[in-house]
Amino acid sequence: MEDASAAAIIDARGFVTGWSEGARRLTGYPPGEALGRAVRELLAEAVPPEAVSARSGTVMVRHRDGYLVGLRVRACAVTGPDGEAGGYVITAASPGRGETSLAGRAFQQASMSMSVFDTSQRYLRLNDAACHVMGVSEETLLGRHFPETVEEAEHSRGFNWHLRHVVETGRPLRYESYTGAPALNREHAWVTEMWPVRDAAGELVGTALAAFDSTEQYWARQRLALLNQAAAAIGTTLDVVRTAEELIEVVVPRFADFASVDLFDWVLGADEAPTASAAEITLRRVAHGSVTEGTPEAAVHLGEVDVYPSFSPISRAMREGRAILSQAGEPAFMRWVAERNTRAPEGRPYRKGVHSMMAVPLRARGTTLGVAVAVRVAQPDDYAEDDAVFAEELASRAAVCVDNARRFARERTTALALQHSLLPRGLPGQAAVQVAHRYLPSGSAAGIGGDWFDVIPLSGSRVALVVGDVVGHGIPSTATMGRLVTAVRTLADVDLPPDELLTHLDDLVTHLASDDQGDEVAELGATCLYAVYDPVARRLNLAAAGHPAPALVLPDGSTRLIPMSAGPPLGVGGLPFEATELQLPEGSVVALYTDGLIEDRDRDVDHATAELCRALTVPADSLDALCDTVLKAVLPEEPGDDVALLLARTRALGADQVATWDVTPDPAEVAATRQAATDQLTAWGLDETAFVTELVVSELVTNAIRYGAPPIQLRLIRDQTLICEVSDGSSTSPHLRRAHQDDEGGRGLLLVAQLTQRWGSRQTTRGKTIWCEQSLTPLF
């Protein structure tokens, strides 16, 4: 009876009239309990309409013991003499059993796991591979709801969700997972294909799936993904220590249970690699990490120095320039573990079970920078040659990032030292303005920029305020900044108006750029703002070359940007610069700054400018405190560019400090003018300067009458020095020369130069002015 077929006879009313031994085996009902019963009493659910119309399909029968059984059935009508249907002969079999068709055998014997579910996620069919994965026979699963056959877990819920999703959408899907299975003792990677199954009428009647075990491909992708992650995660800050920490974060816990990075001390400083190599290698621990919180396995604390003897795997790796594998049981490995336990016995319990380690040198551009060590404790597999190849590739990428960070730190230190040597250390004493400044170098990967500022005393107690920015970063930009600082100071000595000074500076930058042979021309795109403040006239004259307009805070607390034309950046050439002039009340604050203060990729310029103006109105005890207030209010936590800020509070020279006389162009007026100057010095209490002043006034006024043109004017200014200025309508500048013995003239300017601290001339809108200064500080 083993081969008895499962068959039943159903009359026209739907009652069982015949029952085979095979039917008993499949359902558990003996003939005495099945015969005479309505067939619907044996069914667990209604027969699907498509099965009724086709007279074949899969139906769910409730076994006599209570569980569901899925049966593949076929009905054959039995007709009477009159041709009317008198009943049906039903044949049934378990799906997959006794497969005779080629397609059925292909399904049953497929190497991948294949299953068929109905629309309620109940098993209808499984092949042998699926039964192997589930660890039970097909009969055990047929008719059962999927969640009943697996443990309650996230991956099981996800699988069931995908089954339902196919039924709900009617569309196939593919997804990947890394999970275990009931009959497998370790987790596997799976690629699962699910698709809807439809009947001849196109109605969705079930879901089929095929699951491919892709564990080997999964691990290959994981290694590649780890390398890709390392490329994105290592070297994000151009900081040596942080780069080492990023390497640890990549390998722990996915590749190692404990890892460390040790570097030579010179890598952490600004020195180059030493030429000599010692037998014992001294390294400094810069980063380590483990799967255990606090990294108790580490025998060397962060920042400590460790000496590795020549026999150690670490020394071997650095000498041979390749990864060195060590496993438990090897003499060198056991000696290394014993040495770690002796040095830090408190970590011995956490080192128990260490069975494999790998030391990989960190080499970049032919230079060894240090070593990375990876250790496995909980992970069962020892490091193998494939792991060594992977680790060497990972260490190579990390070493380049460490070397880049080292080179960046060295260049940054050099550029910062050069830049500080070019920026004014102590601002020169002058009475025109009170100043405060801040310079914040960028900490970004781009390096130090070319921002700069300057305060230059000019003749007549005036002062020049300068701020500029060179496009680019690093030493080339710093060197360009030095060129511009020198050029501006040189042009300022000529005492040109701001717009003319920028025109000359623009020409100079154009020439410098054309002379550069490199690919990068740092001078192009430099910006500059040059302003001159006169404390006597209380006027500010300024012009800009592609630079942001300064902010102005008036004594009444109101603030605004000074309306002016930004002009083209330096080096463009051929375009004019426009000067702006405005009257300032005493006590006004002028804020000059570079674009790094208000411009950033993540900030709105208008909003940042409004924040700047608001911060300038915040009460502060001093200009230095106001500088700090502005930077705190306007700058983000990590500025992306250099920032230079220069604040200047204007002062004014009162009428009692300035004396002016119009001089008639007649040599007879020289004596009267000289006497008027002497009387003014007496009124100021400066009689000790009278002798020199009389000589200077006589020489300068005489020269103006003899060689100049009307109108002629004499002005004395009592400031930190005594300033004597003689102006006339001629634009011809005097030249200092050495007179010969038989010359009747030519000694006046030489005498002025000898008697005063400094002298010079400047062009004005009406001619020129010759000036000189005398110290008011007693020499003895």
Image (tube, rainbow, N blue to C red):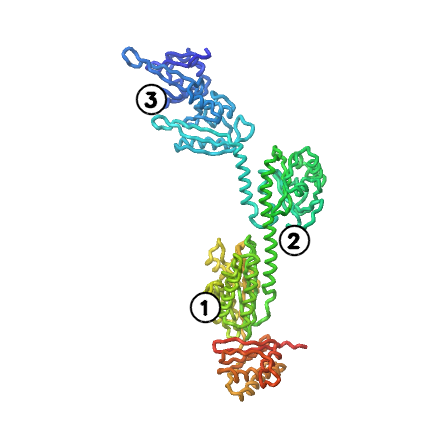
On-image quarter of the C terminus: bottom right
Q: Image height check: is 613 above or below 75?
A: below
* Residue identified by numbered label 2: 271
Residue 555 showing in the rendered view: no
The reply to whether callout 3 and callout 1 are in contact (CB within 8 Å) is no
Query: Callout 1, which amino acid?
Result: Glu
Q: Earlier in the sequence, mark 3 or mark 1?
A: 3
Query: Is mark 3 in CB contact (under 8 Å) with mark 2?
Result: no
Q: Nearer the viewer, residue 317 or 738?
A: 738
Q: Label 3 sits on what residue type?
A: Ser
Q: Identify the residue position indicated by label 1 in the image.
A: 578
Outermost residue on the left side: it is: 82
Q: CA distance from mark 3 to mark 1?
A: 93 Å
Image quarter for residue 103?
Answer: top left
Identify the mark nearer the N-term, 3 or 2. 3
Front position in the image: 196 or 165: 196
Q: Label 2's element?
A: loop
- For label 1, the SS is loop
Q: Is residue 227 left or right of residue 357?
A: left
Measured Cα–Cα span from mark 1 to mark 2: 48 Å
Q: Quadrant of the N terminus?
A: top left
**Residue located beneath label 3 in the image:** 53
Foreground disc of the pair 3, 1: 1
